[in-house]
Amino acid sequence: MPAKSAAARRLHRPDPAFLADAMLGSVARKLRIFGFDTAYVAHTADDEVLKLGVEQGRIILTADKEFFKRIVSRDAKGVLVKGSSDFDDLLHIFGKLGIKSASVAVGSRCAACNGLLAGKKPSEVCDMVPEAVLARHGSFYQCTGCGKVYWDGSHLERLRALAEKLERNLASNPASTKG
């Protein structure tokens, strides 16, 4: 898959916004990398997570069955995952919500803080990345929220491959993610 331009990276996904509870930090980071607006709250009481999810209109993601029951009883939006693997959890979330594509906006959000990424020239980030990285890469992206710098490296390629695998699984057996 070719690298996306800075403009394509900043695509606003029309997809739902998520709120992942403390048990799903790794899933939250992957959703962010896929371009989904995903808040993550660690060390936060369930009542506060529920309140934030309702106030912000986010779909609450949890592996806690009791908490999920409370989400449902408050008529809030939520998805209960098993928490067994990120791949299975993402597949379940996408299937439940009818999301067909995970790769539309890969690399448009910061994995650390959920901020949007903006394209940067190597000269603008030369003091923020290792010299070897600067020498090997010509495209960089900086978070407009926390300032973290990203580039198209092997980690992003692995995540693009994960997105493609999710899409293949969703296309070949969408009914398996329901329930």
Image (cartoon, helix red, strand yellow):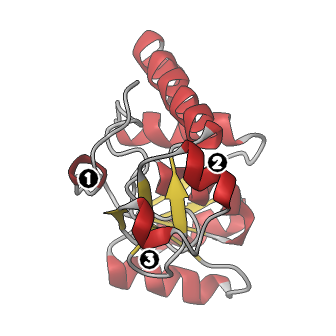
Residue 22 in the image: x percent, y percent? 70, 72
Q: Which residue is outermost to the top?
A: 172
**Which sits in the foreground, 37 or 47?**
37
Mark 2 or mark 3: whose residue is earlier in sequence: 3
The amino acid type, in three-letter code, at marker 3 is Gly
Which numbered circle lies on residue 81? 2
Give the quadrant of residue 97.
Answer: top left
Asked if the residues shown at circle 2 and circle 3 are in contact, with their CB atoms under 8 angstroms apart, the answer is no
Mark 2 or mark 1: whose residue is earlier in sequence: 1
Residue drawn at (65%, 59%), measured in percent from left and top?
131
Residue density around tag 3, few if under 14, some if 14–19, many if 20 or more, within 10 Å: many
Give the quadrant of residue 170.
Answer: top left
Q: State left or right for residue 165 relative to residue 35.
A: right
Mark 2: which secondary structure? loop
Q: Which residue is mark 3?
A: 53
Q: Which residue is mark 1?
A: 13
Residue drawn at (59%, 70%), measured in percent from left and top?
112
Which numbered circle lies on residue 108? none
Mark 3: which secondary structure? helix
Residue drawn at (38%, 77%), measured in percent from left and top?
144
Residue 138 in the image: x percent, y percent? 43, 47
Give the quarter of the figure containing the N terminus.
top left
> Rounded to the nearest whole Å, what is the CA distance between mark 2 and mark 1?
22 Å
> Rounded to the nearest whole Å, what is the CA distance between mark 2 and mark 3?
17 Å
